[in-house]
Image (tube, rainbow, N blue to C red):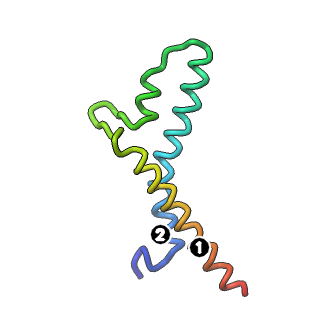
Amino acid sequence: MTLFQNPRRAHRALVPIAVAPLLLTAITGILFSLLEARHIEAEWLLALHIGHFGPLDLEPFYSVILGVCVLVLAGSGLSLWFKTRRRAS
């Protein structure tokens, strides 16, 4: 059985990959706001928040990457939810 024939297995494989950029964006956004309120310069956090990772600049694509991650998480989670609801009925 391949990875995508088993929704639970696919979800377990995709979640760590998809949640990483979402957590990074949330954490850097929160930290940047907190530090800015205390008048502490943290432009490097803003750079990470928008997808600029040193020599690797994903800024033009980072919003799309985050959107795809949300869709992957929602799609795989809904797939599992519908599958367990069908079994229960």
- Residue occupying the point 46% across, 63% down: 13
Q: Local crowd at mark 1 within 10 Å, few (<14), some, or many (≥20)? A: some
Give SS at disc 2. helix
The amino acid sitting under disc 2 is Ala
Residue 7 placement (x, y as % from top left): 51, 74
Residue 26 placement (x, y as % from top left): 55, 39
- Residue occupying the point 59% across, 73% down: 80
Looking at marks 2 and 1 on the same chain, the residue that comes earlier in the sequence is marked by: 2
Frontmost residue, 11 versus 70: 70
Q: Local crowd at mark 2 within 10 Å, few (<14), some, or many (≥20)? A: some
Residue 60 placement (x, y as % from top left): 34, 41
With respect to residue 83, does 71 lie above or below? above
- Residue occupying the point 50% across, 60% down: 71
Residue 87 shown left or right of residue 1 in the figure = right
Frontmost residue, 10 versus 64: 64
Q: Quadrant of the N terminus?
A: bottom left
Task: Specify the farthest residue to the right.
Answer: 89
With respect to residue 49, does 32 lie above or below? above
- Report the disc number at residue 10: 2
Q: CA distance from mark 2 to mark 1?
A: 10 Å
Residue 50 placement (x, y as % from top left): 42, 35
Which quarter of the picture shows residue 31?
Answer: top right
Q: Quadrant of the C terminus?
A: bottom right
- Report the disc number at residue 30: none
Q: Which residue is mark 1?
A: 80
The amino acid sitting under disc 1 is Leu
Q: Are marks 2 and 1 in contact (CB under 8 Å)?
A: no
- Residue occupying the point 45% across, 80% down: 5
Give SS at disc 1. helix
Task: Specify the farthest residue to the top.
Answer: 39
Instruction: Tell me how many marks there are.
Output: 2
Frontmost residue, 19 versus 46: 46
